[in-house]
Amino acid sequence: MNFSFTRDQLDLRDTLGEVLSKEFTPERLREIFEGLHPIDQKAWGVLGEVGMFSLLAPQDLGGLGMGLVEVCLAAEELGRCAFVGPVVEHTCAVVGHLSLLWSLGLAGGDLLEGPGQEDFNNLVSGTKVATVQLRPTDPVAWGEASDLVLLCYEGQGPRLARGLMWDDPNRPRPSLGQATPPVAQVPARSVDHSYQLSWVDQGQFNRGGIINLDLTFPIDQFDKKTKTLIELVRQITIERCTLVVAGQLIGLADKMISMAVDYAKDRTQFQVTIGSNQAVKHHLANSYLALDHARHPVYYAAFNLDRFVEDLVSHSMSDDDIAGRWDECLRDVSFAKVYASRAARLAGKTSLQCHGAIGYSWEHDLHMYMKRSWALANLWGTVDFHLDRVTGLVLR
Amino acid sequence: MDLTYSDQEIQFRHEARQWLTQNAPKLPMPPGDTREGFDVHRAWEKVLYEAGWAVVSWPARYGGRDASLWEWLIFEEEYYSAGLPQRVAQNGIFLLAPTVFEFGTQEQKDRILPRMASTQDMWCQGWSEPNAGSDLAGISSRATRDEAAGGWILDGQKTWTTRGAFCTHLFGLFRTDPQADRHRGMTYFLVDLSSPGITVRPVNKFDGDVGFAEVFFDGVFVDDSNILGEVDRGWEVAMATTGSERGLSLRSPGRFMAAVDRLIDLYKARQGELAQDSLAQNSRYRRQVAECWMKAQAYKLATDATVSKIVAGQKPGPESSLNKIFWSEMDIEIHETALGILGGMGHLESEWMKGFEFSLAGPIYAGTNEIQRNIVAERLLGLPRR
């Protein structure tokens, strides 16, 4: 047993934190929030340079061959600065997903050679931006800002398509923000103005929008057992994304508590700094406690998910092992997501209260972090969904 | 990072489980906070000692079996999982002993630890006074130097001394330099309660058991060999003890994990009736049980992280205050949930009710949770003191 991070893991986290604090400042976040650009291409490129997108790609495919523990460490840093863009989707759902299929011998040799190679390399390096859609009716995170989208529906093989662009240059590009949302009148804008949502026009896709890049495949060619495995890989991808979002929520909570602590040390009322008041201290102590106890479950789940994936790839589990251990993974991921979501929500509320009126203003940065945490808290499964899943598995 | 148990640790768990299964006493035992119960518990803890399970992580020369901290956590899990009760020796083996290991002389270790492990000496904690509770540095019991006799004369009064009515020895703070700054000028004394000049008056807890005592000191002589750490530096020594009390050793995760397992069993046995009464009520308790499971698991993981740091050579610091808030509030929540599941029968006297009553003391003892929140805010977050 050892719950400490290795020197390499901490270096990775620190390097990323340093890069982000230079490249993705609150000013940059605000520009995006104000609608000046959808994502920060330069910062995205820098993330690519430090290897963010290659964390889950095996070394044979030019990646760093790391696991979810490392991605979660990185996610804390991304959350701390409320980084804008489909990092989770790109890293886990696209690169991680395709890599895992490849490791299991389900993606052919196409990631190494042939027409798929260039696209895959572009994804690993971050030269191209990719996002994911799990159900035909789901909104797509940062779809408009992405070059590629992985359509990854239940019971179907994943299909990588060229973003939301069309193969026919003569056909006018639809206005994607309003492209037939599945439910009438669904607004296309998150309260987190930096969180861009798009919808996929399924009709357009089915009329030839999908470009099979030979990275992916029609699922019908496989037998039942293989289909089950492909579906399990899809499930793993979902759980990985969920957990990495939990990691981001931890970073956001940490950031919002730090902001409040800094403010409480500085702001004076009744001739004393407000942070010397027990009422303020206890608010912040409670919030910090929730954060501290939410952090370990994220890494526990990440470690166990990594082991599950390793053993899956090395074929060292029986079918019963897989079923039992998978249930534990689901339980642990849900537990982490519940705690991380709550910690972020409490940190936001506490931070706002400690800031007082200034925290309620548009010009203060707090609301940008708070709104991101609102968005993430119920994405990749609501708190209630995850709480019910824990309940079901604990009371089996 | 490696969150798996080694083969050796798995083997250790197996051995502990096997021994506990074969040697567990008749349960339930009478409460340890009564005269009769205390003796029953003490006898059981002597059985543990004789088989080498009393203080597994201590060196063998003091009565342990040189187990690692991880193995100690495993033993605790198995111990509570077997339904066994909290140790009446806890204030000695879990609070004083870590402090003796850190500050004691070799002579003190040899003299104190084996007798403590074997339950010959039973230790209680003498800190609170009538006018010094949360403000521990406000104690006024004093020690006066007797140079000729090579020791000190203790005068004053300690209170809320847990199991003080039954214990044989007391460790406590006494003021040795009344002129000094309030956090200085205190010394950590080890006192034999049979010494002349000591009066112990039992005090009942609100559950009716004699959990507490007041201890009066009237010219009690203690020689120099019974000072732990340096004279006038008792505050630092005491803070090491509070670290153990709030953090790792007093309330290991196994205790709460076992309580949650029992809670799950209780819910499963009662869920039919709960659902018959009201579906909404049933689903609320389902979730509440899961909340308790998550809390116990979160506490286990936080403890694993702490132990990893200790094993790597770091000292546990003010983080122990986070733990103390967490376990004390969790303990109440687990018991409230159980009593809720028992419904109209929840108020009847039972192990759950006894546990609930005890859990209500958690946010008060070992430094109130309000004091812990101040420590978290000041020492972990860096907010200014008043």
Image (spheres, rainbow, N blue to C red):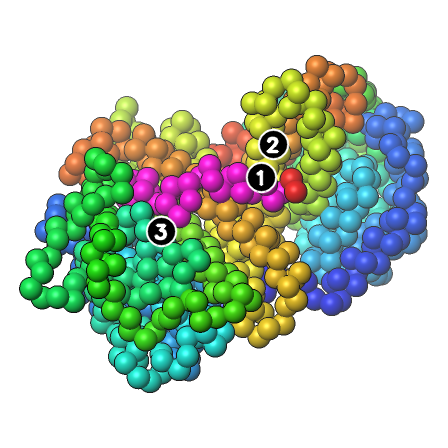
Under mark 1, the amino acid is Thr
Asked if the magenta segment contains residue A385, the reply would be yes
Q: CA distance from mark 1 to mark 2?
A: 7 Å
Tell me what residue is drawn at x 58 percent, y 57 percent.
A326
Q: Secondary structure at mark 1?
A: helix
Q: Are marks 1 and 2 on the same chain?
A: no
Of A261 and B350, nearer the camera is: B350
| Chain of the residue displaying label 1 | A
Q: CA distance from mark 3 to mark 1?
A: 25 Å
Q: CA distance from mark 3 to mark 2?
A: 30 Å
**Mark 1: few/some/many CA within 10 Å (<14, 14-19, 20+):** many
Which residue position holds label 1?
A: A391
Circles 1 and 2 in contact, beta carbons < 8 Å: yes
Under mark 2, the amino acid is Arg
Is the magenta region chiefly helix, strand or loop? Answer: helix
Which portion, as a residue range, is magenta? A369-394
Q: Position of residue B374 (x, y in %)?
A: 47, 34
**Mark 3: few/some/many CA within 10 Å (<14, 14-19, 20+):** few
Which residue position holds label 3?
A: A135
Asked if residue A173 lies left or right of residue A150, the reply is left
Which residue position holds label 2?
A: B286
Asked if residue A126 lies left or right of residue B164, the reply is left
Disc nearer the start of the sequence (3/1): 3
